[in-house]
Amino acid sequence: MGVVYEVIDQQTNQKKALKLLASSAAEDIPDVVARFEREVQAASSIQSENIVRVFDAGTDSGSPFMVMELVHGRDLHQWCKQLKQLRPEAVIRVAGQVCEGLAAAHAVGVIHRDIKPGNVYLSEYEDTVVAKLLDFGIAKLKMDQVQGDPGLTKTGNMLGSPHYMSPEQAQGLKTIDHRTDIWSLGVVMYKMLTGRTPFADLDSMGQVIIAIWSMPIPPVQDLAPWVTPELAAVVHKALQKKPGDRFASAAEMAAELRKLSRDGSFQLRLSHLEPLSEQARTVVAPRLPDAGPEPAEPPRLIGDERTSGTMQAAIENTHAGEMTVASARKKAGISLWIGGSLAVVAAVSVVLGAIRVNRVRSERSEIPPTALAASAPILPSAPSAANVVTSAEVERPKPAEIRGKVIVPAGVTARLDGEEIPIRNNTIEVVGPPGSIKTILLVAGKRESKHQVILTEQGPTPSALVLPGPPGKKPPPAPGTSTATATKPPKPGVDRQFD
């Protein structure tokens, strides 16, 4: 988003931090400076030791900036990178302090929307460490950027950090409330305890977004068997797919974490941030009986008013193969198969998830049984309201056959499941039972590409196909899509990577 300088306030002679945002942000949104200043004013109204203070905001040569307190230490991302897996007591205290900061922010109506290790700064004062939240309002600015213009394709920049987004934020819903921050904090706790995010092994942003609202969260104790069931219960309650099943507030989550702290406080010292001992890693705590209800039914992807430009842009980028982690981080030049369908992405996600869980379980079976944590009794299982089926939840009958149209580029011939099919007005008709997958081969001269389309109740997905151009050339946009969307290059200075 920009660069941070250490500066001196000439009026007070105090050192402060000045964050200068990339000028590209101001070019994409009308009145961006005024809106950014309003967000900063809201953040500066929060009175909490666990939030970095904001003193001023403005613009310099077209680039928005804000002046913040200067803190010394390292962010949580650097600590996680160094320690891999943090001690449970450290996780409880860091998360508890973040909860207190969020509670203060939510009390004045400010939602962070981008809670991640890089935005949690562990400020050091001699032996005492204080967790402070950074960058209030910036994620709101990013989301407004994509909702204001669905044609923009800088999805990695606008969505923030996909691995830490809540299901409702991944869908781009406009009904996001403070509970999205609770989900993100749950992912941060998962990362601190296990050394990875729940879907870290998925290869693209599209896969991650789909998994967030369609796949169950792997149990934290599968990756960190020493975690007590009480602490695992807090993590998994924060990671419930439905906002109503999470903690009702950050204060409620803090109260549960305080019960798990050894001294009932969140005071954090450098000694808490020492590496997890090998002896601690051999402990196998009692298992949490139930990590939570199954994920809710995935929302409709195409033609649904609940799916905003954010989600649609992510899906389209997945089809075009623009957002693989490998290409973003390693610059290996590997892209996804152009025109690959969401059905293939989802199937790969499920297979990878199953392989990961089976591998972890087999590794756990090799851990020698040692002394169990005395403070970790098995929690009694209780009936969940999510398992009670009411008449309103009875699944409606599914259609026996789906009939829909798929847009194809001009000048191509098409084969559907090996048989040539007529093309009328740049569309082909696809018919089959719900959930069936159809293979479509597009041919234009010596060029051809194979696509798979899944038939859903909302129609074929994807609903438009493209034919890759010759090497070194960009493929032409499918009929009905925006030329600007398909060809607009990323602006310099914008980081497309995601953590």
Image (cartoon, rainbow, N blue to C red):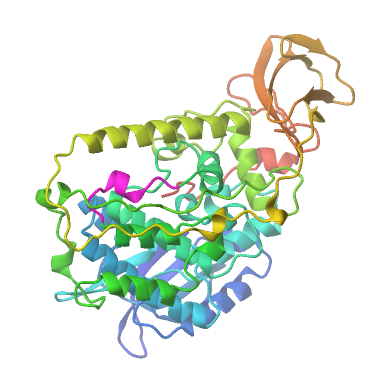
Q: Residue furthest right?
A: 424
Dominant SS type (magenta):
loop
Examine the image and state in which quarter residue 404 appears. top right
In the displayed structure, does residue 156 sit left or right of residue 234? right
- Above or below, 75 against 464 in this view is below
**What x and y, as percent, mark residue 385?**
55, 60
Give the residue at x 64% y 55%.
146
User: Residue 189, image x and y in percent?
Assistant: 34, 59
Label total for image: 0
Q: Is residue 382 above or below residue 348?
A: below
Q: Is residue 473 magenta?
A: no
Q: Which residues are magenta?
A: 217-227
Residue 406 visible, this angle: yes
Q: Where is residue 44 shown, x and y percent of the image?
A: 47, 82
Question: Can you tell which quarter of the image residue 134 is in?
Answer: bottom left
Q: Residue furthest bottom?
A: 11
Q: Does the image show residue 116?
A: no
Measured along the vertical axis of the image, is residue 185 above or below residue 276?
below
Of residues 495 and 281, the one drawn nearer to the viewer in this rendering: 281
